[in-house]
Amino acid sequence: MKQAEQGAEVRPDPVDARLGARLAELRGERGWSLGELAERSGVSRSTLSRAERAEISPTASLLNRLCGVYGRTMSQLLSEVETEPALLVRAGEQTVWEDRASGFVRRSVSPPHPGLRGELVEGTLAPGTDIAYDRPPVPGLEQHIWVLDGALDVTEREIGHRLGVGDCLRMRVWGPTRFRCAGDTPARYVLAVVLP
């Protein structure tokens, strides 16, 4: 556990702790060393180790790379750190995860279940936030992006789209994508994800 400057113990965020444990389990299930996972994901051994021990809060980009290696979506991974699947998840009980480094907040709206192919996610990007993913977690992933507030620039296959309130973009993701808050106010959107 982390130590605060004045000697008080600082516990890791509970979601980060469960997420780190699940990442360690996934690596262990495959029998990979940290070095092997680093080669497969392009993430340094030290970063992987610190994420597994919940010493850092993983970024969206890091989780995307690991999801690609493990063949699951980010929502699937996050649902695996929940206690048990439910049919109904109240707004106050939905898992919220924040990439503090970029200003991205992700709310898992759909009740988690590993056997479902579709899910809903609410994303919020602070002004100036620009997130690039080098590859999809699952090739051919279908995404529908519906903007609720603000403006969002989405780039996929080197084609850029400016989305305003009420606009919806459908895409099947095979390569790099980029999400950027295009205005002076936060961009809030619904992301519907469907596994191929």
Image: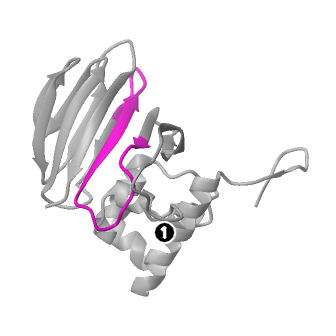
Residue 191 drawn above or below residue 55:
above
Q: Residue 31, percent across and down?
A: 43, 87
| In the image, residue 117 lies in the stretch drawn in magenta | yes
Q: Residues within 10 Å of mark 1 (few under 14, many from 20)?
A: many
Q: To which quarter of the image does residue 83 belong?
A: bottom right
First to last magenta residue range? 107-130
> Visible in this render: residue 34?
no
Whether residue 61 is situated above or below residue 169 in the rendered picture: below
Would you place residue 69 above or below residue 139 in this image? below
Q: Residue furthest top?
A: 184
Q: Position of residue 70 (x, y in %)?
A: 33, 70
User: Percent x, y for residue 165?
Assistant: 23, 17
Give the left or right position of residue 68, taking residue 172 as reference. right
- Looking at the picture, how far across and down is residue 144, in whole percent? 17, 40
Left or right position of 17 against 134: right
* Quadrant of image for the C terminus: bottom left
Q: Report the side of 87 relative to 10 (left or right).
A: left
Task: Provide the residue designation for mark 1.
Answer: 23
